[in-house]
Amino acid sequence: MKLRDLLSVDDKKKLNACAAKNEQLSRKDWEEIMGIQKDTYRKVNGRIRRKI
């Protein structure tokens, strides 16, 4: 499976915009594009809460 298959349309646009500028992406940028820094949620007593 290729990286382009996993990314959403918005993420592909961000990636292409950075590539058009011919700049190197930092580790933080890659994590943002891949969605590593997103909040995670879990179900607690019937409510959905953000995992800490």
Image: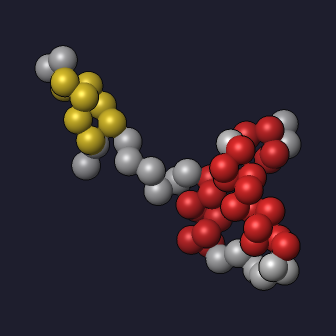
Question: Residue 31 at x, y = what percent?
Answer: 58, 61
| x and y percentages locating residue 18 in the rendered image | 75, 72
Q: Quadrant of residue 43?
A: top left
Q: Is residue 52 above or below residue 28?
A: above
* Closest to the observer, 18 or 50: 18
Q: Quadrant of the N terminus?
A: top right
Where's residue 46, x and y in %?
18, 17
Q: Residue at position x 62%, y 53% from top?
A: 34
Q: How many callouts does the rendering have?
A: 0
- Which residue is more in the foreground, 45 or 5? 5
Eyeballing the image, is 50 above or below 37?
A: above
Q: Residue at x 38, y 48 (%)?
A: 39
Query: Is 39 on the left-hand or right-hand side of 51?
Result: right
The image quarter in which residue 14 lies: bottom right
Q: Is residue 49 left or right of residue 24?
A: left
Q: Give the camera-side residue of 48 and 12.
A: 12
Looking at the image, what colour scheme do you see? secondary structure
Residue placed furthest toward the top: 46
- Say which residue appears at 38% left-offset and 42% top-offset: 40
In screen coordinates, is 48 left or right of 3?
left
The residue that appears at 25% across and 28% down in the rendered structure is: 48
Res. 41 image quadrant: top left
